[in-house]
Image (cartoon, rainbow, N blue to C red):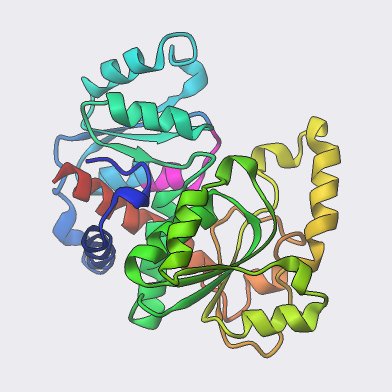
Amino acid sequence: MHLITLKNWSETEILETVENCIKIKNHPEKYRHAATGLSLALLFQKTSTRTRCAGEIGIVQLGGHAHYLDWRTTNFGLADLKDEIRVLSAYVDVILARFLKHEDISISGETATVPVINGCCDRYHPTQALGDLMTIQEHFGRLEGVKVCFIGIHNNVCNSLISAGMKVGLEVTVIAPEKNPAAVDEELWNEAAQKGCYKAVSTDKIDDTLELQQVIAQNDVVYTDTWIDMEFFTDPDFAEERDRRIKLMMPYQLNPTLLAGIDCKIMHCLPAHRGYEISGEILDDPRSVIFEQSENRLHSMKAIILKLLA
């Protein structure tokens, strides 16, 4: 069993994992030897804070061992991916891979002889979504019927929210003036829309802040993410595209004016660009659960590891 995308996980598998996330968080001492003698390889093409720490620290707190592999210091970039994945599978018990392309994580899952966890690719971010479900469950005591409004670029995080939400009854409304091309998944969107779990609000129908506020106010959670992938934000070769996106997206920034008087929880998968997709005041707002959400990546990663090892 792998975690490449939550599209392949059942409602029961997702709900049981979320339940275990909370158990592990509340009673970590019970799980200190759950993975004794087992090893997790972290194979990363992309930068990472939360996913890397959740994997490395999580497996150690479960009694196992972590082995971090920077793609550039291995032969993965020089040899056939399938060959290298087969080799790595012989050394470890679980692989946590953070790849640029969804195609590569899919190939890894098809080739590996041990469980593979998608630690983020350009189409999905399932470990983030499971941590998000855990956070929502903690604050609302349920998942079914909770309404989440995602505002920003329709990306991998948004896809995984929709995928998870479709299985557990979240209602995800997306306000996205733009989609990341690699994140387009018409099959997922159509299926979720048919089940009433996903609705895309055309930004052509939102003319001002008041109309945007009215959409947000119908939801229990408002969620945003970076408008520009972190590795490109300071890249001079990406400057023109960065400036175009900022100009397009600034009316959708989460800030005190937009969220004035709205009773909702505020989420962001981090890292954030303060002053762009979200203001500093909103990151630190009493309604924000962003840093709890970040901490929960550790507990949810442990639950994912144990689920796959089982």
The question of residue 99 being in magenta is answered with no
| Residue 39 versus residue 308 in the image, above or below | above
Q: Quadrant of residue 192?
A: bottom left
What is the residue that sits farthest to the top in this orientation? 79
Task: Tell me if 290 is positioned left or right of 202 in this view.
Answer: left
Nearer to me, 90 or 299: 90
| Residue 259 versus residue 32 in the image, above or below | below
Task: Tell me if 309 is positioned left or right of 301 in this view.
Answer: left
Which residue shows up at 80% across the image and 62% down it?
Answer: 250
- The residues colored magenta run 46-54
* Residue 195 place in picture, x, y as percent: 40, 68
Q: Is residue 296 visible?
A: no
* Residue 161 place in picture, x, y as percent: 46, 60
Which residue shows up at 44% across the image and 66% down it?
Answer: 194
Q: Quadrant of residue 107?
A: top left
| Residue 4 versus residue 263 in the image, above or below | above
* Residue 9 place in picture, x, y as percent: 28, 52
The question of residue 50 being in magenta is answered with yes
| Number of marks | 0
Q: Is residue 167 visible?
A: yes
* Residue 133 place in picture, x, y as percent: 39, 66
Nearer to me, 215 or 196: 196
What is the residue that sits farthest to the bottom in this orientation? 261
Task: Tell me if 47 is positioned left or right of 197 in this view.
Answer: right
| Residue 192 versus residue 180 in the image, above or below | below
Nearer to me, 88 or 154: 154
Which residue shows up at 80% across the image and 44% down it?
Answer: 242
Which residue shows up at 79% across the image and 79% down it?
Answer: 209
